[in-house]
Image (spheres, helix red, strand yellow):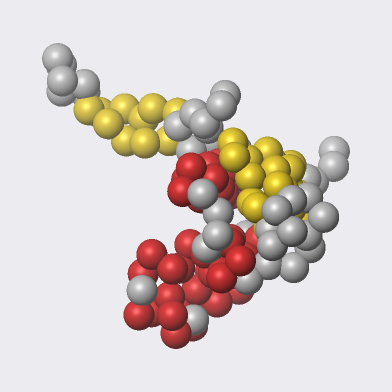
């Protein structure tokens, strides 16, 4: 059995670079403990909590079209739909390929989890 640590994704919109080239397909690797710790150590992520997701994603994205190096500033140019997609994708691959949201039935008050579906699935 082969251990898979990298996953292919396709953005709904894509990252538009300075040459107006759109990068839609990418590869994300599984996160490590050091990836998570890097967010806590980043000064801008400490000052602006919403910036933390860009720091984390800049570490785990391995390729995006022709691009192979990423910074939080570069990923800040993503459309919000693509950032939301990446957050869902990150959660999915780092949680045994399943992301679940805890919920409660309004009729019987039973608690259960609902699978989160990625945009476009």
At a point 78% along the width and 50% down the height, the residue shown is 65
Q: Is residue 109 left or right of residue 11?
A: left
Query: Most extreme residue toward the top, as rendered?
Result: 107
Image height check: is 87 above or below 107?
Answer: below
At a point 48% along the width and 62% down the height, the residue shown is 53
For the question of whether residue 36 can be seen, the reply is: yes
Quadrant of residue 75 in the image? bottom right
Where is the C terminus found, in terms of image quarters? top right
Quadrant of residue 78 in the image? bottom right
Image height check: is 18 above or below 24?
Answer: below
Q: Nearer the viewer, residue 77 or 104?
A: 77
Query: Most extreme residue toward the right, as rendered?
Result: 1
Q: Is residue 5 left or right of residue 87?
A: right
User: Where's residue 27, x and y in %?
Assistant: 74, 49
Q: How many marks?
A: 0
Q: Nearer the viewer, residue 115 or 13?
A: 13
Where is the N terminus found, in terms of image quarters? top right
Q: Is residue 67 left or right of residue 46?
A: right
Image height check: is 23 above or below 117?
Answer: below
User: Where's residue 109, x and y in %?
Assistant: 15, 23
At a point 21% along the width and 21% down the height, the residue shown is 105
User: Where's residue 38, x and y in %?
Assistant: 55, 77
For the question of whether residue 95 can be seen, the reply is: no
User: Where's residue 119, x and y in %?
Assistant: 52, 31
């Amino acid at each position: 059995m082969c251990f898979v640590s990298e996953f292919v994704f396709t953005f709904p919109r894509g990252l538009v670079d300075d040459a107006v080239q759109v990068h839609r397909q990418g590869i994300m690797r599984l996160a490590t403990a050091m990836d998570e710790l890097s967010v806590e150590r980043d000064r801008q992520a400490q000052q602006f909590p919403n910036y933390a997701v860009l720091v984390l994603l800049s570490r785990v994205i391995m390729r995006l079209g022709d691009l192979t190096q990423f910074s939080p500033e570069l990923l800040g140019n993503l459309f919000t739909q693509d950032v939301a997609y990446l957050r869902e994708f990150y959660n999915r691959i780092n949680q045994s390929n399943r992301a679940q949201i805890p919920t409660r039935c309004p009729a019987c008050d039973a608690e259960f989890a609902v699978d989160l579906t990625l945009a476009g699935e």
